């Protein structure tokens, strides 16, 4: 019912002209009134906090908001302004996008919602109808981490591997392409990124025996512009690039039969000045190096940060975080670009805290390794050498028996986004300490569409739950050391937002959404979300008023697979929560002027509050199970007048025809329609 009314309202409002396109948008066509993001707007996004126009807010993916109306002094008064019930109970991992007052978010099974960012009213829904049997073929829950919005379109990658372009105004499909081989277990959970007329998307599925790649599609037509594989293919086929010829020398055996892995399932960042697109690659397939590449080798470009030329996808430089990975140490975790003072001089850097537990600072122009230190407990390596290559610790080889290893395949940090504040110079990391146990699966045999790891997973059935915890870690990337931490009982907490109000926001596995002081970590405010939060919050502003939003919905791989270590998390219905400071209360004079104002709408309002409001709510807002008459008016228009007159037999809705005239019923209907337009959109 709500969906239908919203569609009608969108149609009404589109006819009225909608929002203005950006002033700084020369290449945007004048007709785009929804989702008018373009390259100029993305390039300039750092300066204005009004929108949250791309996944990490800016191409540099810092997840820092320059908004400061909500700050460390007033955040204690933060209140829920609106919420949206997603109707889901599984993991919600998306970062919402906000453009010109409209919010675009995704949920389980790759469903997209467009909402009024001021009121939370649903404008449209797109359900890509992902076949539910795919749930078992996805490694890590049926989650989605969000959309991209660009030139009037909303782009979503679906769990079954499609990239779909939607009309930002109404959610109708403009084009869709299959980006994966439907016969392989490749899934999309990550958010597409948009730049230079292209939509960039990767996928996951390394455990199921696939070959990793990242693709660029033409944003207008959906045509494939380029595809870059991250690991070498079958040596009897022509090699796709120079970079893959180099990589092939670092593999042995018949790795290509299992795909090799190295999937690009989450992180990307873009530097338009350097003309470099950065992507992180995942683990090998299977995890265990001897089973994948029996003669050894680094297995390029697994677990690597790749700098690509976005024009053609050519590899410019790479840094492999875990050569010859054997622990599922992906480098798909968030990549942040920032200029940091290194040895006293500003340096264009790239930062990452991948699963392997080391915090990396690289020169993002050349890929030069600048520094790297463990940000959580690390037992698999004794440190990094001068070039950033890990020095593997002795006694970690698990081929001849069980070894405890930290971090584990859940990572010292996983996909939950971190944040960099240029004010404090700190990176805020959703860090976790989870004990790993690895033991060679002696009976391992690769199966085409099954979970191929090569280690005995049942060792975790013998674990006590105390082996896992999490914390919010404030990390100084220049000094490579901890600034402060806030311990959480459980791991798998939410992504992080930092703001110019000296604030850091993070949700937790146990169902809290908390604001901390960014400089010292002191908790200042919290709300109970009733379900574990794993997604990252955002902030945006409409007409100068600042909002903070977060999707709450417990799930993801640790929730699914963690067993007793994940017990204690809050499990409840998924909800999109939006917070703001209280609005100033109106004065008695303002209220009197409002109540006695003249005109037919005010007359309709008075009649409504005389006859209808004690059942259907003051201001026509129903907070009970009785119908919200704004929605009825949006659906039926003046037809609501007939319902008021004649009643609805058998429902408790009486016929009011004896009390109110035809003309009065019509005034009530017009009032309800105006309320619908004001508050539903
Ligand atoms: Ca993996």
Image: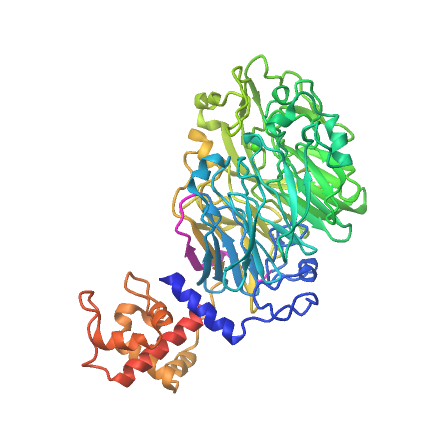
Residue 229 image offset from top left, x and y in percent? 68, 37
Q: Quadrant of the N terminus?
A: bottom left
In the depicted view, which residue is nearer to us: 224 or 381? 224
Q: How is the image coloured?
A: rainbow
* Magenta extent: 68-90
Q: Position of residue 492 (x, y in %)?
A: 51, 38
Ligand 1 is found in the corner quadrant, namely top right
Looking at the image, the residue that sits furthest to the bottom is: 598
Q: Indicate whether 39 appears above or below 138.
A: below
The residue depicted at 67 percent of the width and 47 percent of the height is 269
- Can you give x and y, in whole percent of width and height, for residue 665 in the image? 28, 80
Left or right, residue 297 beside residue 162: right
Residue 20: image quadrant is bottom right
Q: Is residue 658 visible?
A: yes
Q: Is residue 174 above or below residue 230?
A: below
Is residue 72 inside the magenta stretch? Answer: yes
10 within the magenta span: no
- Furthest-top residue in view? 400
Residue 426 visible in rendering: no
Q: Is residue 123 left or right of residue 281?
A: left
**Side (left or right) of 629 relative to 524:** left
User: What is the x, y in percent for residue 58?
Assistant: 65, 54
- Work out whether 475 lies above or below 575: above
- Residue 428 relative to residue 275: left or right: left
How many labels were placed on the picture? 0
């Amino acid at each position: 019912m709500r969906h239908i009314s919203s569609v009608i309202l969108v149609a009404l409002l589109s006819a009225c002209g909608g929002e203005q396109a950006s002033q700084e948008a020369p290449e945007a066509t004048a007709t785009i009134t929804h989702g008018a993001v373009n390259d100029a707007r993305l390039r300039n996004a750092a300066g204005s906090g009004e929108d949250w126009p791309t996944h990490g807010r800016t191409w540099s993916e810092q997840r820092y908001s320059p908004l400061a109306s909500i700050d460390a002094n007033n955040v204690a008064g933060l209140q829920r302004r609106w919420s949206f019930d997603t109707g889901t109970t599984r993991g919600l991992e998306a970062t919402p996008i906000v453009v010109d007052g409209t919010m675009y978010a995704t949920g389980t099974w790759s469903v997209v919602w467009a909402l009024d960012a001021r009121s939370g009213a649903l404008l449209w829904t797109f359900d890509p109808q992902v076949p539910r049997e795919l749930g078992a073929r996805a490694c890590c829950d049926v989650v989605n981490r969000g959309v991209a919005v660009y030139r009037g379109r909303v782009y979503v990658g679906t769990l079954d591997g499609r990239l779909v372009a939607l009309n930002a105004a109404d959610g109708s499909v403009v084009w869709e392409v299959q980006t994966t081989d439907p016969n392989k277990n490749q899934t999309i959970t990550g958010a597409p990124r948009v730049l230079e007329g292209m939509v960039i998307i990767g996928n996951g599925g390394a455990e199921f025996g696939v070959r990793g790649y990242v693709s660029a599609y033409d944003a207008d037509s959906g045509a494939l512009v380029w595809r870059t594989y991250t690991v070498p293919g079958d040596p009897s086929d022509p090699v796709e690039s120079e970079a893959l010829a180099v990589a092939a020398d670092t593999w042995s055996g018949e790795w290509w039969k299992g795909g090799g892995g190295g999937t690009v399932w989450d992180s990307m960042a873009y530097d338009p000045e350097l003309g470099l697109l950065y992507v992180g690659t995942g683990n090998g397939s299977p995890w265990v190096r001897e089973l994948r590449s029996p003669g050894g080798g680094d297995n390029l470009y697994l677990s690597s940060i790749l700098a690509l030329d976005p024009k053609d996808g050519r590899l410019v430089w790479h840094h492999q975080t875990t050569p010859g990975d054997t622990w599922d140490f992906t480098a798909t975790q968030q990549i942040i670009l920032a200029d940091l003072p290194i040895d006293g001089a500003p340096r264009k850097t790239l930062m990452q805290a991948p699963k392997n537990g080391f915090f990396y600072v690289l020169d993002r122009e050349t890929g030069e390794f600048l520094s790297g230190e463990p940000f959580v407990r690390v037992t698999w390596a004794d440190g990094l050498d001068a070039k950033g290559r890990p020095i593997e610790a002795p006694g970690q080889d698990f081929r001849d028996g069980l070894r405890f290893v930290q971090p584990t395949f859940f990572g010292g940090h996983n996909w939950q986004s971190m944040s960099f504040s240029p004010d404090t110079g700190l990176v805020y990391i959703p860090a976790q300490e989870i004990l790993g146990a690895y033991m060679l699966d002696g009976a391992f045999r690769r199966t085409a569409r099954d979970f191929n790891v090569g280690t005995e997973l049942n060792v975790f059935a013998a674990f006590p739950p105390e082996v896992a915890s999490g914390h919010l870690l404030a990390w100084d990337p220049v000094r490579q050391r901890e600034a402060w931490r806030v311990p959480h009982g459980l791991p798998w907490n939410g992504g992080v937002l930092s703001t110019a109000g000296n604030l850091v926001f993070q949700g937790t596995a146990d169902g809290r959404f908390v604001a901390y002081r960014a400089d010292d970590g002191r908790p200042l405010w919290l709300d109970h979300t009733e379900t574990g939060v794993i997604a990252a919050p955002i902030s945006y502003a409409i007409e100068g008023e600042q909002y903070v939003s977060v999707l709450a919905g417990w799930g993801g791989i640790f929730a699914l697979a963690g067993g007793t270590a994940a017990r204690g998390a809050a499990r409840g219905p998924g909800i999109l929560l939006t917070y703001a400071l209280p609005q100033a209360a109106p004065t008695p004079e303002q209220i009197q002027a409002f109540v006695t104002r003249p005109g037919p709408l005010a007359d309709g309002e008075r009649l409504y509050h005389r006859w209808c409001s004690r059942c259907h709510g003051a201001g026509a807002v129903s907070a009970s199970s009785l119908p919200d008459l704004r929605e009825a008016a949006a659906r039926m228009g003046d037809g609501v007048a007939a319902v008021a007159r004649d009643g609805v037999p058998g429902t408790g809705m009486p016929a009011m025809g004896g009390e109110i005239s035809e003309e009065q019923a019509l005034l009530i209907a017009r009032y309800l329609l105006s309320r619908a337009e004001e508050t539903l959109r």
